[in-house]
Amino acid sequence: MRQVVYENLPFAQLEDHFEDIFSGGYSVSLFTDWQNRRATQVWIKRRIEPGKSSEFEPEFFGAKLATKNLHPIAELSAENCTEQMGVPGPWYERLPHFRMGFTPSAGKELQSEYFVPHQHAVEAILAVERLRDQVGPYLLISEIRAIAADDLWMSPCYKQACVTIHFTWKQDWPAVSKLLPVIERELAPFSARPHWGKLFTTSPAQLKAIYQKMPEFIELSKRYDPQGKFRNEFLNRNIFG
């Protein structure tokens, strides 16, 4: 695979060419600080296949090809990141953003992520962008990526392809805990599902409404784990409560 980074993709391009942008490689990630109506970086990873070009153009929907390795968080060194600049390498050294054995992202951080049905992606992104002044002071970076549908009952992508909006926050839980309900209200019209392993404040009632297979999952859990040995406070509150 080859990996490159483009800088400063205008959100106007995202509105007009969303599908083309996310079809630009085997894996495409947009990073943004939600300021100035643009994605600060676009990370594109392409497979090298016989008879097919994996070369990268100098411009990608208004974004310019980077001339050096970059970290998603601009002020941090790219030393921890996987090789960029189109240098060929095995998939396991290109698909991750960060090198094995090195600190991923900022290291000390909080994280949230919301899964939005693919067809609502642009509307949802613009809804969050309107919160830029509230989000900005507490954000390290956001990542936007696309994920295929699956058939796992409790997966956020159950029976629907999704685009996720991820937030890497500064370690300020009091501030972040107040921001999450604001973001969730903006994303509620799109039936956004929170990442189970990251921070969210979505209520158990709302979770039950957006996870259609939750009743079957609860029944299955009761059958195979009647004593609740594999539950914890988090699961009891959000699923079994």
Image (tube, grey):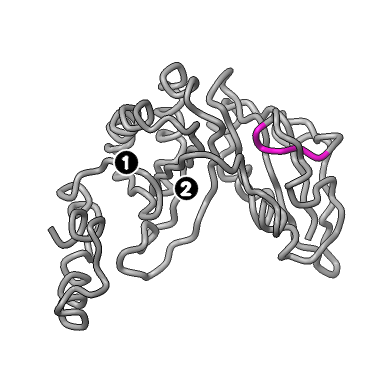
- Spot occupied by residue 166 in the image (x, y as percentages of width and height): 48, 42
For label 1, the residue is: 190
Where residue 182 sits in the image (x, y, percent)? 31, 28
Q: Which of the two residues, 230 or 21, is positioned nearer the viewer here? A: 230
- Residue nearest the observer in this picture, 66 or 238: 238
**Which residue is found at the position 86% from the left and 34% from the top?**
67
Distance of label 2 from label 1 (alpha carbons): 11 Å
Magenta span: 69-73
In the picture, the quarter occupied by the N terminus is: bottom right
**Residue 158 falls in image quadrant:** bottom left
Q: Residue flagged by tag 1: what amino acid is it?
A: Phe
Q: Nearer the viewer, residue 209 or 238?
A: 238
Q: Identify the main secondary structure in magenta.
A: loop
The residue that label 2 is drawn on is 163
Element under disc 1: helix
For badge 2, the amino acid type reads: Val
Q: Is residue 160 above or below residue 173?
A: below
Q: Residues within 10 Å of mark 2 (few under 14, many from 20)?
A: many
Q: Nearer the viewer, residue 70 or 63?
A: 70
